[in-house]
Amino acid sequence: MRQYRNPTGLVVYPGLFRVSRVMPTSAATIQHILNEWTLYVKPEQSRRALANILGNGLLTAEGETHRRQRKVLTPAFATSYIRDNMPIFSAKAADLVDVLKKELPNQSTNGVEVFGFLSRATLDIIGSAGYHIFLITYSF
């Protein structure tokens, strides 16, 4: 980064199959890209590849569809919801620590592979927090 940093806040580097990739390197450049979302769209090939893996959703949507989906999801990330779910996050983090402690005696010389554990913990948190929000929203 120090060697290639330039005043534009962008670094261009070769990607797969000699496709140029652009990486923003300054806060101002990132803010511009995020604010001018209509100017910067994902390449069709990348969008299709993401859709095959993740399905059609927020990460693969562009333009008005993306804005509408983001608007629908925004309340779930409000400060009050996050604050209400902190006990769930803390409890699941403690569970993850317990699981990893049990895994330590079995570790190899390369360490403990945590990706699977983190993936399961993430899904567990999403499921528990989603259920909590559902109960609050639709309490009978």
Image: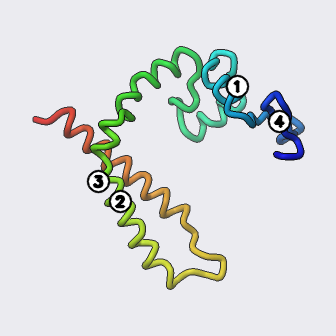
Element type at marker 2? Answer: helix
Residue at position x 58%, y 69% from top?
113
Per the model, the C-alpha gap separating discs 1 and 4 is 22 Å
Residue 110: where, in percent of width, then height? 66, 77
Label 3 sits on a secondary structure element that is: helix
Circle 4 sits in a helix, a strand or a loop, which is it? strand
Left or right of 26 in this view: 50:
left
Label 2 close to label 1 by CB (< 8 Å) = no
Callout in the foreground (2, 1): 2
Callout 4 amino acid: Val
Looking at the picture, tell me which residue is in the foreground, 57 or 104.
Answer: 104
Instruction: For label 4, count other residues whose C-alpha is less than 10 Å away and answer few (under 14), some (14-19) or many (20+).
Output: some
Task: Name the N-terminal-most of marks 2 and 1.
Answer: 1
Q: Return the residue at label 2.
A: 92
Q: Are marks 4 and 3 in contact (CB under 8 Å)?
A: no
Q: Nearer the viewer, mark 2 or mark 3?
A: 3
Measured in 3D between alpha carbons, the distance from the residue under mark 2 to the one under mark 3, in whole angstroms, is 9 Å
Callout 2 environment at 10 Å: few (<14), some (14 to 19), or many (20+)?
some
Res 11 label: 4
Numbered tag placed on residue 44 in the rendering: 1
Q: Mark 3 highlights which residue?
A: 87
What crowding class fits label 3: few (fewer than 14 Cα within 10 Å), some (14-19), or many (20 or more)? Answer: few
Mark 3 touching mark 1, by CB under 8 A? no
Say whether disc 3 or disc 1 marks the residue closer to the N-terminus. 1
